[in-house]
Image (cartoon, rainbow, N blue to C red):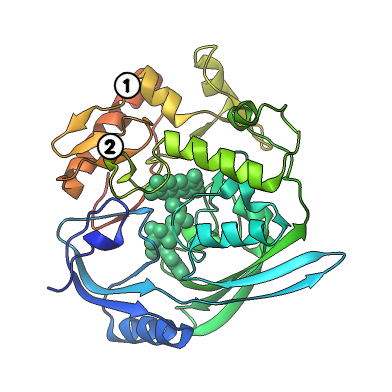
Amino acid sequence: MGESLKEYTSLHLGGPAKRLIHAKSEAELIAAVSEADKSGEPLLIIGGGSNVLIGDEGFPGTVVRVETKGNSFTVDACSGGMITVAAGESWDEFVKWSIDDGFVGMESLSGIPGTIGASPIQNIGAYGHEVAEFIARVRTYDRKSGEQKTFSNSECGFEYRSSLFKKEKDRYVILDVTFQLERGEMSLPIKYAELAKALNVNIEDRVLIEQARAAVLSLRALKGMLLDAKDHDTWSAGSFFVNPIVSTEIAAKLPDDAPRWPQSDGRVKTSAAWLMERSGVKRGDCHEGAGVSTKHVLALVNNGNAKAADIIELARASRSAVKDKFGITLEPEVQFVGLSL
Ligand SMILES: Cc1cc2nc3c(=O)[nH]c(=O)nc-3n(C[C@H](O)[C@H](O)[C@H](O)COP(=O)(O)OP(=O)(O)OC[C@H]3O[C@@H](n4cnc5c(N)ncnc54)[C@H](O)[C@@H]3O)c2cc1C
């Protein structure tokens, strides 16, 4: 077996890959994927490795790490900017660049680890916004047809932490993403109470985009949601579970102080972190080398010597606690490779 995948994941976990290819150009990326597909070998595509939990046995096939770079953009006084960014570019470097260049919209999504190419897959989101609001199109390589296919925003099937690319897992390789952003100095209306409080403004107020980014980064750092190699609380894959969306009947049975966010389809989203804490899961809880972050109950972390199996055990215990207490089954946000809950 070949190189360990540990250093390519934010959990610092993952056994060896049979073969690891660093795809630095689009041609290399497509060639690596189509060759692996033709050979019938298992294929795993990774970007920043910040949303994956890879098993200790590693991966018995080809792992392609997307490292493509480059961007192009056109700016129009009326419609703003159309910015196309290669899949392997860093998400947060793009966010910073967009803000420095006077584009509005990305500020709430500051500090999320990973690559551009992964951003549409689970429709990344934070502080009241999600990337689907800003995506014009996504260009892909379709592994089934062997051809390129471009999806407009409405064809991407974006939902809360999901998209067509996540549902049709292993079919589309994302090559680049085109964002449509307006120019301006002021942020989008602040939608998230905690962020409004940190900025000392009211919900729906606007602040300078740089101010919004700085506040988001500070809040994320306090929660261990900014990568820091020296801080084991950030050796995670972010939120381990998605916030459950439940029927009104189930929501009505939750205690009065449970968070409730009504959805457009009549269902209600509640907070996975709240459910875990009320079920007795505590920050700092441990199982072998795995722990619940000391800064945020929803992040399961590698305390330095965890095995992937330890994280799974801890996740199972958290999930059972919530199921026993509230009858709600938490669904993972993290993508598992060679493991299951
Ligand atoms: C500390 C921390 C905080 C986080 N905070 C947030 C947050 O606030 N909001 C949020 O939404 N997420 C958050 N995340 C999760 C994660 O950052 C995002 O899901 C991110 O988009 C993953 O990007 P990546 O490049 O690391 O993807 P990876 O983890 O490498 O891959 C994720 C999935 O996408 C697939 N994939 C990756 N690139 C491609 C491609 N080019 N084509 C096809 N498939 C591909 C992989 O096969 C895998 O299934 C956080 C993670 C961490 C560690």
Give the secondary structure at mark 2: helix
- Residue drawn at x 18%, y 41% as measured from the top left: 310
Q: Tell me which corner region of the image, top left, top right, bottom left or bottom right, holds residue 180.
A: bottom right
Q: Tell me which corner region of the image, top left, top right, bottom left or bottom right, holds residue 164.
A: bottom right
Amino acid type assigned to the residue bearing label 2 in the image? Ala
Numbered badge on residue 190: none
- Residue drawn at x 29%, y 62% as measured from the top left: 8
Q: Is residue 95 above or below residue 263?
A: below
Q: Is residue 40 above or below residue 89?
A: below
- Residue drawn at x 26%, y 78% as measured from the top left: 41
- Residue drawn at x 62%, y 26% as measured from the top left: 197
Reading the image, the residue beneath label 2 is 315
**Picture quarter with the C terminus:** top left
Amino acid type assigned to the residue bearing label 1 in the image? Asp
Give the secondary structure at mark 1: helix
Q: Is residue 137 above or below residue 209?
A: below
Residue in the foreground of this view, choosing between 224 and 144: 224
Reading the image, the residue beneath label 1 is 324
Tally of marks:
2
**Picture quarter with the N terminus:** bottom left
Residue 285's spot in the image, x, y percent?
A: 24, 27
Q: Tell me which corner region of the image, top left, top right, bottom left or bottom right, holds residue 131.
A: bottom right
- The answer to whether the residues at label 2 and label 1 have Cβ atoms under 8 Å apart is no
Q: Is residue 18 left or right of residue 154?
A: left
Gap in Å between the C-alphas at discs 2 and 1? 14 Å
Q: Is residue 202 left or right of residue 60?
A: right
